[in-house]
Amino acid sequence: MKRSIRLLLLAFAAVAAACGPRERTLVLLSTNDMHAKIRQFPRLASAVEACRDTAQLVVLVDAGDRWTGNAYVDLAPTPGMPMLALMNHLGYDVATLGNHEFDHGQAFLGRMIDSMSFRVVAANVLSDTCTFPQLPPYTILDEDGIRIGFVGVVTNYEGPGHPAGNEESFRGLRFPDPQQLAERYAAELRPQCDLLVLVSHMGDDRDAELLARGTQFDLVIGGHTHKEIDTLIGGTLLTQTGKDLRNVGVTTVRFRGRKIAGIDYRIVPLADYAPDPDFQREVERYYGNEQLNSPVGEFREAANKWGVANWMADAVADEADAQIGFYHIGGVRLDSIPAGGVSTALVYDLEPFGTRIATMKMTPAQLRRMILSKYNDEENRKEAHRVDLVSTTPYVIVTDARDEALDVEFPRLQEGRSYRIAMSDYIFNNYRDLEYEDGAVTDDAVAQTLLEELQDDSPVRPDNLPRQKVRVRN
């Protein structure tokens, strides 16, 4: 009798297991801050295709900044279109906007969104203009009965009040607080979704702030700060893949029925994949521009990041007949320039923004205030607590033990004297606490200035030593 009961219980257990919810696996492949690095796209295609061949359910997501950073994309007949064509071909599903999506203005972006075959979500971009259609704050995908909600947000911290960039690019748009909008739509979507994802271009520090307050999101696919992030905050997975399409993020979510049974994340280097031949041929066509490929000058020696930044500061000062030149380190888009020929494409990779030179008169006291304000900036943290302003004149930022800037020492400047200054129009238009006389933005483009410097002064011998330093006061 006991044996019969045991057999009956085992039979019931087997039936219950057979009737229980089946386990399924969803893989979210993610990219962020690709910055038009289409040379990497054939490797991404191989990685995505390999995943689709083996996984049950695959969704491809991008967290913004798809263009600006590659002349073959940025100077295409329709700027940015090579990137979108590759993304459409690969079959992206969902994306949000980054700050660089606005580089060509909101009207241009409005037209480009029509060319995106994937869904674009942006909860905190509100439009009052017909040239930029209002985007949905979120979308829900149904993958084999699993409902995945995606909320999109973009930074508004650097403007302030909008993403980093020129003011005219954002005219007619409003960018309310991205964290508040993320929370609002998370509460609205949670009952409708089995997996809730925030696709964020706020930066990992702002994402962490949001998660520390408690959130209903299961996953954050982040961008903007160009870091490799794999961490858990308050039970929510926070991720980011770095920049320039060096990696792809792989988030694996196991479901039992429609309940999450487990979730994990890996950053996978794309160097491990051979390029997909079809995508490789497509990319090579974009690179067949002889005008961009031809060298216009040369560097006698390799330039490191400081050498490149110093060269740019020197060039804007020389072009404007200024006594002092400044350039912001965030506008220096290459970490190095090798010795040898320098092509037009490389110059536009270095300066892809159409930046112009601004001139004005400033005293050392006014320069000091500008530098201190930028170093201590708590709003635009991405550009704070570092040497952000590279200059032709040496200076030392003096900080306390908490890394708060207290003073700036100018060993070669005379206090009270007014100097003619040249800088990028990004500094001129966006930096706080900027005081000057006779300030104006000129018609001189930085990229064209650099090309002329190469033509006139080759071979260029870079100054690879930092002229600016930070010292902690004893």
Image: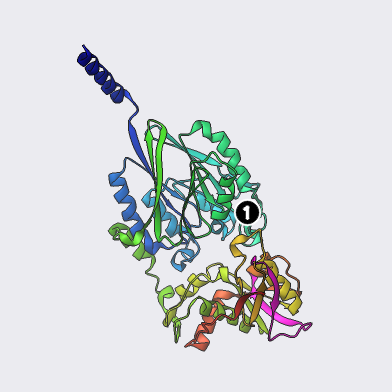
Q: Image quadrant for the N terminus?
A: top left
In this rendering, position of residue 424 left or right of residue 95: right
Q: Is residue 293 visible?
A: yes
Q: Residue at x 67, y 57 (%)?
A: 160
Please tell me how many numbered marks the rendered image carries.
Answer: 1
In the displayed orientation, state which residue is furthest to the top: 1
Q: Position of residue 65 (x, y in %)?
A: 50, 57
Q: Which residues are magenta?
A: 402-425
In the displayed orientation, state which residue is furthest to the right: 416
Label 1: few (<14), some or many (≥20) within 10 Å? many
Q: Residue at x 30, y 59 (%)?
A: 273
Q: Position of residue 304 (x, y in %)?
A: 48, 78
Residues 141 and 416: in front is: 416
- Residue 103, by quadrant, is bottom right
Q: Which residue is mark 1?
A: 156
Residue 270 vertical placement versus 437 (above, below): above
Q: Position of residue 446 (x, y in %)?
A: 58, 75
In the displayed orientation, state which residue is furthest to the front: 2
Q: Is residue 442 visible?
A: no
Q: How is the image coloured?
A: rainbow
In this rendering, position of residue 216 left or right of residue 319: left
Amino acid on which disc 1 is placed = Asn
User: Which secondary structure, mark 1?
Assistant: loop
* 406 falls in the magenta region: yes
Q: Image quadrant for the C terminus?
A: bottom right
Residue 61 vertical placement versus 20 (above, below): below
* 32 falls in the magenta region: no
Q: Position of residue 229 (x, y in %)?
A: 47, 55
Residue 193 vertical placement versus 233 (above, below): above
